[in-house]
């Protein structure tokens, strides 16, 4: 039995999560959001490790900036490139279009 359907679901879940996090960061722009706040916006069932891993992934891509505070919490903000992505200026593999959620940035 192949794990391919499970991998496809996991990939789709991560794409959705990344998009939703970017939308929430865009709504907060120019403010930052703490990782635990992002987690509560998405789902309490998601581990903080998952949120942090995806924030780092999006930071590596240049879509968010993240900083750690003294307590170890991460604070994330969407970048200009991230806002362009959310606004549909270009597409990125691994992240769904925010327009598919009806988000227009307004």
Image: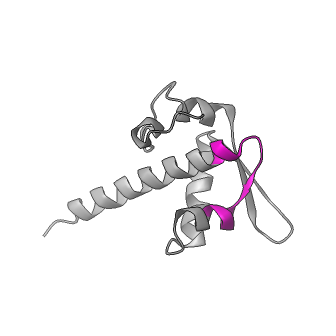
Q: Residue at x 43, y 44 (%)?
A: 94
Front residue of this view, candidates 104 and 73: 104
Q: Quadrant of residue 99?
A: top left
Figure quadrant of the C terminus: top right
Considering every residue shown, the one lying at the far top of the view is: 89
Q: Left or right of 13: which side holds 74?
A: right
Considering every residue shown, the one lying at the far front of the view is: 106
Front residue of this view, candidates 91 and 38: 38
Q: Quadrant of residue 74?
A: bottom right
Considering every residue shown, the one lying at the far left of the view is: 1
- Residue 102: percent from left, percent from top: 44, 39
- Residue 22: percent from left, percent from top: 58, 46
Q: What stretch is highlighted in magenta?
A: 25-38
Q: Residue at x 59, y 66 (%)?
A: 39
The image shows residue 42, relative to residue 57, as above or below, that is below
- Residue 40: percent from left, percent from top: 60, 68
The image shows residue 53, relative to residue 29, as above or below, that is below
Q: Quadrant of residue 85?
A: top right
Front residue of this view, candidates 37 and 62: 37
Q: Left or right of 8: which side holds 103?
A: right
The image shows residue 79, relative to residue 17, as above or below, that is above
Figure quadrant of the N terminus: bottom left
- Residue 83: percent from left, percent from top: 62, 34
The coloring applied to the image is one colour
Residue 28 magenta? yes
Considering every residue shown, the one lying at the far right of the view is: 70
Residue 58 magenta? no
């Amino acid at each position: 039995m192949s794990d391919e359907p499970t991998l496809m679901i996991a990939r789709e879940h991560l794409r959705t999560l990344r998009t939703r996090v970017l939308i929430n960061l865009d709504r907060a722009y120019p403010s930052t959001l703490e990782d635990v706040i992002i987690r509560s916006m998405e789902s309490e069932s998601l581990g903080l490790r998952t949120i942090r891993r995806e924030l780092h992934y999006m930071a590596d891509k240049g879509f968010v900036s993240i900083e750690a505070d003294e307590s170890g919490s991460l604070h994330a903000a969407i970048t200009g490139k991230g806002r362009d992505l959310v606004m549909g200026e270009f597409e990125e593999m691994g992240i769904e279009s925010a327009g598919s959620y009806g988000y227009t940035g307004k």
